[in-house]
Amino acid sequence: MTGDTDNLCRAILKDRRMPYLAALLAVVLALPGVWTGWQLDDHLQRLVMLGPPYSSYEPMDLFGIANGNPELTREYKDQGIVPFWTSPGFRLSFFRPLTVLTVWLDYQLWPASPSLMHLHSILWFAALIIASGYLFRSLFGAGWIAGLATLLNAADPTRALPALWISSRHVLISTFFGVLFLLWHDRWRRGGWKLGSFLAPLALALALLAGEMGLAAVGYLVAHALFVDGAHRRSRATAMVPSLCVVFSWFLIYSIGGYGSAGSGTYHDPMTDFWIFLGSLVTHAPLLLAAEWSSLPADLANVVPADQHATVLLACLLVVVGVVLALLRTIRTSSLARFWSVGMLLSLAPIAATFPSGRLLSFVALGAAGLLAVYLGRLVERFSSVKAGSFHCSLVHAAVVLVLALKLAIAPLLIPVAAWLLDSIDDSMMEAISTVPDDDQISGQDLVILNPPDQLYYGAYIPVVKRLQGKPAPGRIKVLAAGPTEMEVLRVDSSTIRVRISAGLFSGPFGRSFRSTSTPMHRGEEIRISGMSTVVQEVDSNGDPTEMLFRFSHSLGDGRLRLLRWENGAGYVTFVPPPIGETVALPPARTQFNIF
C-alpha cells in the first residue's frame, strides 16, 4: 500500500458521508432478497395478517404459537398446529408490538407485494447501518477508524437474514433503536447533550417493544459505564437508572402478559428455566462467536448429527481462543476495545436462549466491527512506525490486507448467497406441500403423516399454504414422527400400528422445539388427541421415545383418514399399511433441513 493510496483510503473513511455510503453498500448487497417472495414463517404471518376467512388469529399473535394454557395446547394438538408430543404447559409467545405495527402497515399498503415488504425491511437495514455509523463516530471521533468500523459493520454477512427475511424484521428494528439508545446515551454522558437523558431511555423502550433483542443493548450500557464513561462511579451508576427502569417495566409487562417460553427444548426463558438457559448460554456462546468471526453460518450447528456436536463445539472454541489471543494485546491496552469486547459478550445472553442462528448476531456484529477496527487501527499505527520495506513492515501490511480482504471482499458475498439459500429452502418446502392431495374430500379427513422431514414446515404448514393458495386443506393433521431417522411400521390390527424409530422421536434439527428435556416422556405414557391415542412403548436414557403404539378411532382404510409417507425425491406419497402382523421399513427423510 503506497502512501498516496493510504492517504486516499483514510480520506474516504473519514468522510462524514461514510455512514450513508456504507448503508448504500448494505442495500446493494441485500437487493437480491427483494425478488425472493414470502419464505417459511412469512406464510404463517401472511395467514394471520390477512385475517378472515384465512385465519381467526389476531395481529398480536404474529409472534406466538401458544400461551401456556393446557386446554389451548390440547386444542392445537387436535388440529395439528403443534405435535402430539408437545409439553402440556407449552408456551411460545413474544411481545413485539412495534414490529407487528410495521407488518400491519405492509398489509394495509401492499398486501400482495412481498417485494415491497422486503424493501421495507431493507430500509430498516439501511437505517441501522447509518445509526451505527454515527455511534462509531461518537465513540471513535471523526477519524478514519470510525469509518472503517462502519464499513465492517455494513459488510458483515450475519446481517443477511434479518434484511432478507420478512419474519426477522424485528431484529433490524430492535437493533436500530438499541444503537440509537447507545448513541444518545453516549452523547449525553460524554458530550453533555442533556436531551439524550430523555431520548436514550425512550429509544431503549422502542428497542424492547420491537423484540427481545433490545436486551442486548443493556450489555453495551454496562460496558459503557465500565470503560467509556469517565465520570465518578456514583454518577455512572445513577445514569443507568432510567434505562434499568425501562427494562424492569418491560419485564413486568412481559411477565403479566404471559409472554416468553416454557416447555420447549430449543427456547429457554431465563425467568422460568434459568439453569437450562445458563447451560444453553455456555454451549451456544462459542458457536455464535465463532460464526461471527469466521463468517460461517451459525445455523449449520443445527443440522450437524448429535454425535458430532462435541467436535463442532471444540472447533468453535479453538476459533474463539485464536481470536482472543490475536486481540488480547489490543484489549489490554485500549479502553474502547474492552468496551466493544465486553458489550459483545454480554449481548450474547438474549440470543443464546434459543438455537444458534446467524440472524440473531446483529448486536454481536456491532461489537465485532468496533473491536476489529481498533485492532486494525493499532496495526496500521505500528506499520507506519517501522521502516518501509522491512520484513516487519511487510508482515503487518499483509495482515491488514488479508483481514480486509476477508471482511470487505469475500464475506459480503455471503449476503446474496444467503438470499438464494433461503429461497431454495422455501422452494423445497412449497414443492413438498404441493405433493399433498388437495381434492375436495381432504377437508373432511384427518391427514396422517408418518415420517415428514420436519413437523413444523413440512407438517403444520400444510394447511397454512393450502389456504393461502385457495385450495382445500386437511381438517386435522397428525404427524407420527419427524426428522432424518429410519422407521419400522408394524400393523397390529385394523386401526393400530406400532412405530419404531431408530434415532428417537426428537432426532431432527427442530425435534426438541415442542418438548423440553425437563419434561421427559416415560414408558407406558399415553397421550390422547382427537381421533388418536399414542402409548409410549420404549424410551432411551434421555426420555426420547424409540417405540410407540398409535391407535386410531377409525380403521386405517377408513375414508376419514388419509395416510401419507415421505419419499425422498418425490415428496409425499400415499402410505399403504402392511397386512396385519407385517412390518414395513421407511428410510430417513432428507431435505435441506437435514443435509448430513
Image: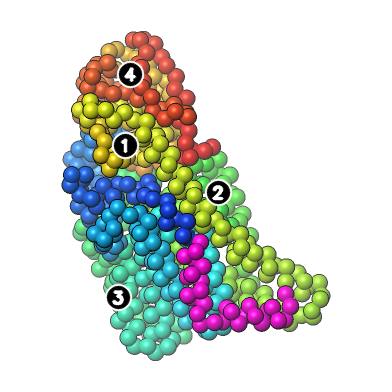
Q: From this view, report whether residue 351 is shown above or below residue 399.
A: above
Q: Is residue 407 visible?
A: yes
Q: Earlier in the sequence, mark 3 or mark 1?
A: 3
Which quadrant holds the N terminus?
A: bottom right
- Gap in angstroms between the C-alphas marked 4 and 3: 58 Å
- Picture quadrant of residue 479: top left
The residue nearer to you, when weighing 478 against 155, is 155
Q: Earlier in the sequence, mark 2 or mark 3?
A: 3
Please state the horizontal and vertical placement of residue 418, each as a whole percent of the image: 50, 52
- Identify the image's colour scheme: rainbow, by chain, secondary structure or one colour: rainbow
Q: Residues within 10 Å of mark 4 (few under 14, many from 20)?
A: many
Circle 4: element type: strand
Magenta highlight on residue 23: yes
Which mark, by number, is residue 202?
3
Circle 2: element type: helix
Which region of the structure is painted magenta?
A: 1-29
**Three-letter residue code for mark 4:** Ile
Circle 1: element type: helix
Which mark, by number, is residue 497?
4
Please state the horizontal and vertical placement of residue 391, each as a whole percent of the image: 81, 72
| In contact (CB < 8 Å): disc 4 and disc 2 | no
From the image, tell me which residue sits under label 1. 462
**Three-letter residue code for mark 3:** Leu
Seen at 36% across and 71% down, the residue is 177
Magenta highlight on residue 514: no
From the image, tell me which residue sits under label 2. 313
**Three-letter residue code for mark 1:** Ile
